[in-house]
Image (cartoon, grey):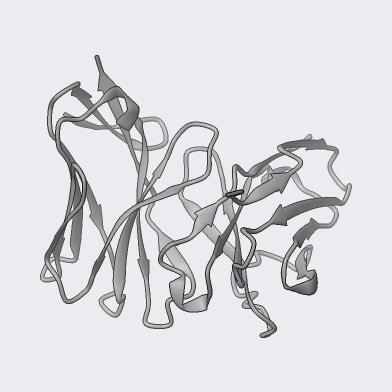
Amino acid sequence: GAGVSQSPSNKVTEKGKDVELRCDPISGHTALYWYRQSLGQGLEFLIYFQGNSAPDKSGLPSDRFSAERTGGSVSTLTIQRTQQEDSAVYLCASSYDGTSGKTQYFGPGTRLLVL
Amino acid sequence: GESVGLHLPTLSVQEGDNSIINCAYSNSASDYFIWYKQESGKGPQFIIDIRSNMDKRQGQRVTVLLNKTVKHLSLQIAATQPGDSAVYFCAEIGGGYSTLTFGKGTMLLVSP
């Protein structure tokens, strides 16, 4: 079946512009996660959605970062007024539900470059 | 042997050798420890997990060992193949089984 998909695969933007990154989780998965991976580094947790519960936003680095998940499926991560330090790969993952978080299925990521 | 690369620790092995990738963790309350594999240009892929009340678990060509006394986790890959070349991350998750905390990763390079 289809895995997690993300778009765009690459995004180049200018400092100060806003960007939107999209994630389509695996159909039927109720839990969705966003991570950030800087060059040669591990994954930094950003935000977690589970069903209709309030999202866990504890990993968002600043108020320029926000995310939505409409209809319990597709999610959009928005970065406002992008800075050069926002350049990274943004990875989305989904799991069957919130109790299955140890087995997360990752998308290929969106590579963001802020000039 | 192991060396510290520009960004990641790197383990270089010959095809057919056994590989051991190590990870130190900090949270004694974690309920599961997991290994993920990330190939170039792709997202991480689940390999194997181990519950905190176990000390060893075996999969196909892989074995995970957990030493809670020294907070150490290792992944052993038998008969390493070029396709095993990737970055390997350890991760831990608490009792809520929601968010993963990832380690920094080790790059495994397998030479034919």
Where residue B90 sits in the image (x, y, percent)?
Answer: 33, 54
Give the residue furthest to the bottom: A53
* Rendering coords of residue A44 (x, y %): 53, 58
> Residue lying furthest right in this view?
A17
Above or below, A47 against A56 in this view is above
Seen from the viewer's position, the closer of residues B8 and B78 is B78
A91 sits to left or right of B21:
right
Which residue is most to the front? Answer: A1
**Quarter-wise, where is residue B57 in the image?**
bottom left
Image position, residue A68 (x, y; %): 78, 69
| Residue shown at 60% from the left, 75% from the top | A58
Residue drawn at (52%, 44%) of the image: B43
Query: Seen from this angle, which residue lies furthest top?
Result: B112
Q: Residue at x 65, y 67 (%)?
A: A60
Q: Quadrant of residue B52?
A: bottom left
Q: Nearer the viewer, residue B54 or B60?
A: B60
Location of the C terminus of chain A by quadrant is: top right
Residue B51 picture quarter: bottom left
Horizontally, is A93 left or right of A63 in the view? left
Identify which residue is drawn at 59% across, 67% down: A29
| Residue B55 x %, y % | 11, 66
